Amino acid sequence: MPAVAEESGAIVVTAPRTVPLKAERSPYTGAVVATTTLTIPVLFNDLDLTQPRDQARLLTRVDQVAISACRQLDRMFPLDPDPQCVARAAATGQDAARERIAAAAR
């Protein structure tokens, strides 16, 4: 799920986690899984996105929120770690951040 750039001055970072469900199934159907996502907004109203320093700050904020979201998912689902969680969550947030940065440059 891609991050959504909100008009309110926030970017949403989404961290996905696929976890097995405990459900009785026929041995012929295989395991049942569900994807849980955690979304956290990254605020940037205090930044001037025309300035390189503030652009870097926004990207750093996105990375930090991705780390935080994935740590929270690790606490929620300790038996189902996802080593790629931070990279995927940060990538979606960074895409939205770069769109905002490009829009500010226009």
Image (cartoon, helix red, strand yellow):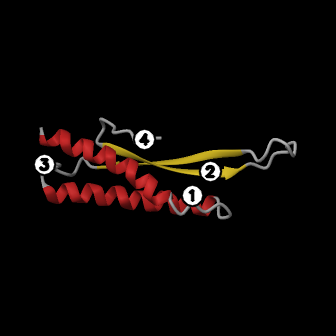
> The residue tagged with tag 4: helix, strand or loop?
loop
Q: Where is residue 87 in the image (x, y as percent from the top left)?
A: 43, 58
> The residue tagged with tag 1: helix, strand or loop?
helix
First-in-chain label (3 vs 2): 2
Q: Circle 3 sits on which residue?
A: 50
First-in-chain label (3 vs 4): 4
Looking at the image, residue 97 sits to the left or right of residue 104; the answer is right
Looking at the image, residue 59 sits to the left or right of residue 69; the answer is left
The residue carrying pointer 3 sits among few (fewer than 14), some (14 to 19) or many (20 or more) residues within 10 Å by Cα, namely some
Nearest to viewer (mark 3 / mark 4): 4
Q: Circle 2 sits on which residue?
A: 18
Q: Circle 1 sits on which residue?
A: 73
Instruction: Please report the residue visible at 19 percent of the width from the left and 42 percent of the height from the top.
Output: 102
Residue 2 is labelled as 4
Is 14 above or below relative to 78?
Answer: above
Instruction: Please report the residue visible at 48 percent of the width from the left and 41 percent of the height from the top.
Output: 1
Cβ atoms under marks 2 and 4 closer than 8 Å: no
Nearest to viewer (mark 1 / mark 4): 4
First-in-chain label (2 vs 1): 2
At label 4, the amino acid type is Pro
The quarter of the image holding the C terminus is top left
